[in-house]
Image (tube, rainbow, N blue to C red):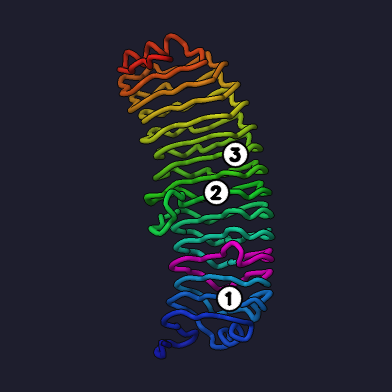
Amino acid sequence: MVDATQEGPRTLQGGRHIANARDWDRFVREDWGRVTGCLEIVAPDLRELAPAAASLRAVGSLRLVCAGLERLSLPALATVDGILDLPGGGLPVLREVELPALSSCGRMSVWGCPRLESLRLPALATCGALHVASNPELTGLDLPQLQTITGSSDCDNGTQNLSVADCLRLARLRFPALRTVSGYWGGIAVSGVPALGEIELPVLSSVASRLEVLKAPSLERLDLPALEDARAVKLNQNAALRHVGLPSLSVLDGPLEVCENPVLAGLELPRLERLYSLHLQDNAALGRVGLPALARIGFNVNVFENRCLREFAVPALKTMNGWLWAKRTPLPENATAAMKAAGAKPAPDS
């Protein structure tokens, strides 16, 4: 159905299926400005979206399965209300994605594109969820205008709303304007990125779910200077990680888990006041843990196989509801005494 009352580029009520280059040419000549439903492009003979859809500014959803598509460019597209899906197996030769005007997207999924080298989204400011995974040639993800991840109700169970995984050449993640990640799965998950050397999140202040960085063996520093609250923080199997900067973090209603970071020598959280649980394991160089403002621990403290640990400061601790487990770790006596005085139950075999 066409909105006939509108001047200029028209609105197509409903969706459109593009099966080949001829369909795409017809779609462009019809000069649609908005498609309210799903624009599905399943055209094996398209190498790029040419001629350009210069008037197309908004779609309900966008899905591409084009075996020959090497370059995706939609220069005027500003809004995707639902899902922008670039699925694994459907774009085997795609090398470049350029959406220079896209400012808002309900959910974006870019996964399993074996030759994708460039993902340019310079105007993206708001996204419900962003998933980038299994793109082995992608070298960087720079989103200079992204301010908020609002949350997506149709995310896969357990998948955080901002997730980057299994991108073997990815060297940098830069989100200089991102402030909040919201929603039930409103977390940040970075994993399986062996070349990653930089994570830039200078103004991130709130993460509704968990923040996790896993299996990033080239990452030496993680600085989140503005982060004040998160559900949980998980930093595991980061072979080069030497510094964790969380100077503003005050509340963790879930666990803090730091495991298998062999060169991390210190962990300082100067403003953390409330923590649900703490798990430190197999951090071979960890010598100091500083939690000077921590007043409450809601559950257990597990400290396993941290053989260099000599300082564990919790001078403000008043309440601890859970077990204190310490195995093959020289937990200082003053820390043990402070936790017991706050109510910790010593594990029988610790």
Under mark 1, the amino acid is: Val
From the top left corner, tell me how far across and down residue 315 is, in percent: 39, 16
Q: From the viewer's perspective, is residue 191 above or below residue 148? A: above
Label 1 vs label 3: CA separation? 35 Å
Q: Residue at x 52, y 55 (%)?
A: 131
State which quadrant residue 326 falls in.
Answer: top left
CB atoms at circles 1 and 2 under 8 Å apart? no
Residue named by callout 1: 42
State which quadrant residue 53 falls in.
Answer: bottom right
SS type, badge 1: loop
Q: From the viewer's perspective, is residue 307 above or below residue 200? A: above
Quick check: is 118 in the magenta stretch?
no
SS type, badge 2: loop
Q: From the viewer's perspective, is residue 113 above or below residue 300? A: below
From the viewer's perspective, tell me whether residue 154 is left or right of residue 121: left
Q: Which residues are magenta?
A: 69-97
CB atoms at circles 1 and 3 under 8 Å apart? no
Quick check: is 78 in the magenta stretch?
yes
From the top left corner, tell me how far across and down residue 276 is, in percent: 36, 31
Under mark 3, the amino acid is: Lys
| N-term mark: 1 or 3 | 1
Residue named by callout 3: 215
From the top left corner, tell me how far across and down residue 174 is, in percent: 58, 49
Residue named by callout 2: 176
Q: Where's the C terminus, which quadrant?
A: top left
Q: Residues within 10 Å of mark 2 (few under 14, many from 20)?
A: some
Q: Where's the N terminus, which quadrant?
A: bottom left
SS type, badge 3: loop
Residue 285 circle label: none
Q: Residue at x 45, y 88 (%)?
A: 7
| N-term mark: 1 or 2 | 1
Label 1 vs label 2: CA separation? 35 Å
